[in-house]
Image: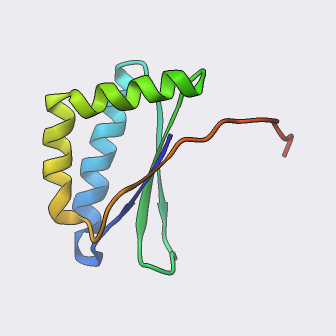
Amino acid sequence: ISVTVPVAIGKIPQARDLLSEWVEGAQSNGMTAALMVKQWSADGPKFVVRTSYDSVADADEARRSLAESDDYKQFVQNLAPLVTGTAEWHVSEQIASANF
């Protein structure tokens, strides 16, 4: 799962801290998660949270579980004033790997 979060220019440090805290918490609970930033996006800065699962079904189950979690709802409520639009969720399935 990839979630792209558009962040208001003056709110980048707060968003980075909040998203970093969430990713670190997810990692400490055994989830494979990473945080990246698109520095030069045409629409302004965007953070990307990526998580990895064994299957699309596992990813969908995790997404549903998060949507029902009170902790996640609070996280989203805290993040809302820092963003400029709707977060975009993408579920991808790897078909082939590449050796770079």
**Residue lying furthest bottom:** 42
Q: Tell me if 83 is positioned left or right of 48 in this view.
A: left
Residue 37, image x, y percentages: 46, 60
Residue 45: quadrant of the picture: bottom left
Q: Is residue 71 above or below residue 43?
A: above
Residue 26, image x, y percentages: 35, 29
Q: Tell me if 10 is positioned left or right of 33 in this view.
A: left
Q: Which residue is at 33% across, 45% downward? A: 20
Residue 4: quadrant of the picture: bottom left
Residue 44, image x, y percentages: 41, 78
Q: Tell me if 55 is positioned left or right of 1 in this view.
A: right
Q: Which residue is at 53% across, 23% downward? A: 57
The number of discs equals: 0
Q: Which residue is at 21% across, 36% downward? A: 72
Q: Which residue is at 29% across, 39% downward? A: 22
Residue 1, image x, y percentages: 50, 40
- Colour scheme shown: rainbow
Q: Is residue 14 above or below residue 18?
A: below
